[in-house]
Amino acid sequence: MNQKSEMPFYVKISIFITGVYFLVYMLYLAQGVIVPLLFSIFIAIVLNPAVNFFVRYKVNRIVAIAFSVIIALILITALGIFLVSQASMFSESWPMLVKKFTEYLNLSITWASDYFDLSPQKIIDWIAKTKAEFIQLNSSSVGQTLMYLGSGIVALLLVPVYVFMILYYKPLILDFFHRLLGDNNRISVNEFIGETKVVVQRYLTGLIIETAIMAVLNSSVLLILGIEYAILLGIIGALLNLIPYIGGLVAVALPMMIALATKSTAWYAFYVLICYYIIQLIDNNYIVPKIVASKVKINALVSIVAVIAFGVLWGVPGMFVSIPLTAVAKLIFDRVDSLKPWGFLLGDTMPRKKRLIFKRYE
């Protein structure tokens, strides 16, 4: 008799963990290819309605794609030039900011020495030692930083080419998925591709609008408070806000530090904190639900874990693509019966409380 031998549970879990490890390791090694490609796919999805708009008006498809990509490049380049000009103004005032922070550091040293009964010289020596170690660590990684910077520039130059090719070969890519999954599943494939496109398109387009609104709100508040470099800090804060939860903390910390360094009283830093808190309330309760309006809702726990995990895997670019990738994964899980529990886990729909009925058996 032939009996089926089932593998023990510990063997299955070992194979699963090993497979996940090698998958993550391969994703890490291939980040130079995968990350620019992911950004290109997302940008292509956002630009696809513009291409269709031009095609409807009898514009050649290649010309429509090229025109859409060029407009996007012009807008991104203009934003980059503006940020660089603002940053150059910030660099001119850097010595004054360093002097101001040095004064705050000396006051902090005096307070710490009195409160903890420590010698001020010991604290100064510890700061100097830490600073020297930090500089030595940074100098040893200059070559690696330059290598990453060079690969980043190359990837940035490849993104427009990827976007053009993805938009041009969109019919070929869609037909590939139809052939891969079979004609019997053509309706399901069309529905999945359509839903995925809508989810990513709405999410990214909504994020662009949200970022513009947040930049205006942040800059307006900082200008009213008289904080220097208000526009630069407002735009940086809006861009950091794209990173869920973590980016908002960094976004408010930067203008608070500038307020401490440039204003005569620390109250301005407190005013910045209050105003940014109000802006975050507006963003979370009105802008995101009304404008971003994503069809797929990801709960806060999964969002934080995804941002941190992709940040560890691919750095800052991984943080920006973490939520769209998680949303697409949830969409896939929701359409596959065996994976629906995972889709439910990623979502933010809380289960209804059920009354537990206990029966007593005598």
Image: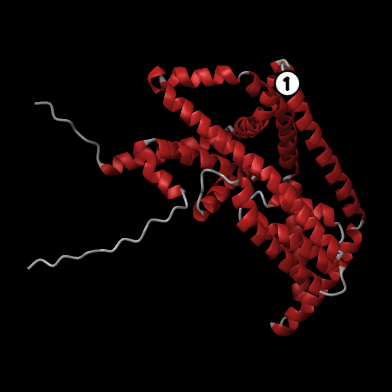
| Residue 129 in picture, x, y percent from top left | 75, 64
Element class at badge 1: helix
Q: Is residue 159 visible?
A: yes
Q: Quadrant of residue 362?
A: bottom left
Q: Nearer the viewer, residue 158 or 315?
A: 158
Picture layout, residue 341 above or below residue 72: below
In the picture, measured across the screen, residue 173 lies left or right of residue 82, that is left
The residue at which mark 1 appears reads as 64
Amino acid at circle 1: Ala
Q: Nearer the viewer, residue 116 or 13?
A: 13
Residue sitting farthest toward the left: 362
Q: Nearer the viewer, residue 159 or 102?
A: 159
Residue found 65% across the figure and 43% down from its top: 206
| Residue 293 in picture, x, y percent from top left | 58, 46
Picture layout, residue 34 above or below residue 222: above
Quarter of the N terminus within the rendering? top left
Q: Quadrant of residue 45?
A: top right
In the picture, measured across the screen, residue 278 lies left or right of residue 104, that is left
Residue found 37% across the figure and 45% down from its top: 341
Residue found 66% across the figure and 40% down from its top: 205
- The 10 Å Cα crowd at callout 1, few under 14, some 14 to 19, many 20 or more, is many
Residue found 87% across the figure and 66% down from its top: 262
Q: Is residue 137 visible?
A: no
Picture layout, residue 313 above or below residue 44: below
| Residue 41 in picture, x, y percent from top left | 62, 30
| Residue 173 in picture, x, y percent from top left | 55, 20
